[in-house]
Image: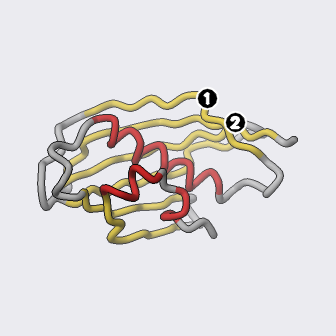
Amino acid sequence: MGVDIVDTLPTALKNIMIIRDVIKNEKRGCIRLTVSISPDVASIHGGLIALLAMTSAEVVVTSLLHEEEALVVINHNINFLKHVALYGQEIDVESCIISKGEKVINIQTFVRSNEEDVAYAVTSFVSESP
């Protein structure tokens, strides 16, 4: 997985979080991010959690593509399990490939805070060649 995670993040995320650790497991097709959210953020909204989950999933899938292939999200389903504890808590986001077909790739993502699951997502992508 030769993608630098910071380069793939939307600017809005770069401005409010610090990536503390990135662990890539190419054999399993996984990536785990540990991030800290800026204390300027009043609360950690579900939209931020969903964006972190989708971005992490995209990094995993992007590592599988050839340069000429395009990637399209066809479904992103997230279940929020618990509210994220505020201030000082790191958020761990782990995304792994669960299936890869000829064109469709499915990624599962767990979002954890304080060692507790706070969200679970499955994101489906389709890869297209020009």
Q: Tell me whether circle 2 and circle 1 mark residues in contact (CB < 8 Å).
A: yes
| Residue 22: assigned label | none
Residue at 40%, 49% (x, y): give it: 12
Q: Identify which residue is drawn at 23% across, 34% down.
A: 81
Q: Is residue 126 above or below residue 16?
A: above
Label whose residue precedes the other's in the sequence (2 or 1)? 1
| Residue 65 screen position, x and y as percent | 73, 54
Secondary structure of residue under mark 2: strand
Residue at (12%, 56%) from the top-left corner? Answer: 87
Residues 100 and 69: in front is: 69
Quadrant (top left/top right/bottom left/bottom right) for the N terminus: bottom right
Report, in whole angstroms, how far the alpha carbon at label 2 lies from the one at label 1.
7 Å
What mark, if any, has residue 126 been given in the picture? 2
Helix, strand or loop at mark 1? strand
Residue 34 sits in quarter: bottom left
Disc 1 packing (10 Å; few <14; some 14–19; many ≥20)? few
Report the amino acid beneath label 1: Ile
Relative depth, front residue between 86 and 15: 15
Placement of the C terminus among the 4 image quadrants: top right
Q: Amino acid under label 2?
A: Val
Front one among 59 and 98: 59
> x and y percent of residue 21 in the render?
36, 71
Residue 41 versus residue 82 in the image, above or below: below
Q: Quadrant of residue 66?
A: bottom right
Residue furthest to the right in view is 130
Name the residue carrying label 1.
74
